[in-house]
Image (cartoon, helix red, strand yellow):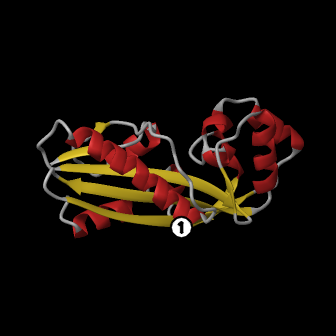
Amino acid sequence: MRYILASGSPRRRELLGTLGFEFEIIPATGEEIIKSEVPSEVVVSLSGQKAKEIFHKVLRDNKDTLVVIGSDTVVSYREKILGKPKDKADAERMINDIAGNTHEVYTGVTVVYGNADEEKVFSFYECTKVRVYPMTKEEIEAYLDTDEPYDKAGAYGIQGLFGKYVEGIEGDYNCVVGLPIARLYREMKKHKLV
């Protein structure tokens, strides 16, 4: 089997590496089409778009059995999705919202597998609640002056500088990082892919 991660995220690459099989990285580049405002539906849909794009792109010139893993993560506060911030003001608004509050992080995973004769798909999502300590204006400003908030959903990375503001989580830590690896392993095992 030829395993492919349809993401360029170094965090997802590191997590998938813990499963112990060789895999390639071919990030999806297609336009993301969002047809819902429900976080769980959005992440499942986007992870599916990514996995299917790469499966069909690689399948064209390949006869192997492919296993393509797509993943997408969103941060949700009061049922509103917080994407990647557009600019510093947007990042500041997001951090102000989540500081001193609890929010949810949803990660959806889709695995498309098979060959030219047969294509199979399964998807799932995980949700983890994250509690953030109250932050002072100075702490928020100092955080916004780093590079960290600008390429991440919700304007923060739990495994980075922002970690010192996280009071606790309820659920899978790896879901917040971007790939709920234990659930992925169980699902792949169920479908005889590992």
Categorize mark 1 by other alpha carbons within 10 Å: few (<14), some (14-19), many (20+).
Answer: some
x, y percent for residue 64: 12, 45
Say how many tags the image has: 1
| Residue corresponding to mark 1 | 171
Quadrant in which the C terminus is drawn:
bottom left
Describe residue 16's horizontal placement relative to residue 34 as left or right: left
**Residue at 15% across, 39% down:** 62
- Residue 160 rendering spot, x and y as whole percentages: 60, 41
Residue 144 seen in render? yes
Residue appearing at x 65%, y 44% in the figure = 156
Depicted 188 relative to depicted 56: above or below: below
The quadrant in which residue 56 appears is top left
- Please provide percent x and percent y for residue 174: 48, 55
Residue 4, visible in the rendered structure: no
Mark 1: secondary structure: loop
The one nearer the camera, 14 or 92, is 92
Q: Indicate the position of residue 137 as horizontal and vertical percent values.
A: 88, 42
Residue situated in front as seen by the camera: 57 or 148:
57
Asked if 150 appears above or below 44 in the picture, the reply is above
Residue at left 71%, top 50%?
A: 165
Type of amino acid under label 1: Gly
Name the residue located 16 percent from the left edge and 51 percent from the top edge: 115
In the rendered image, which quarter is residue 166 located in? bottom right
Is residue 87 shown above or below 54?
above
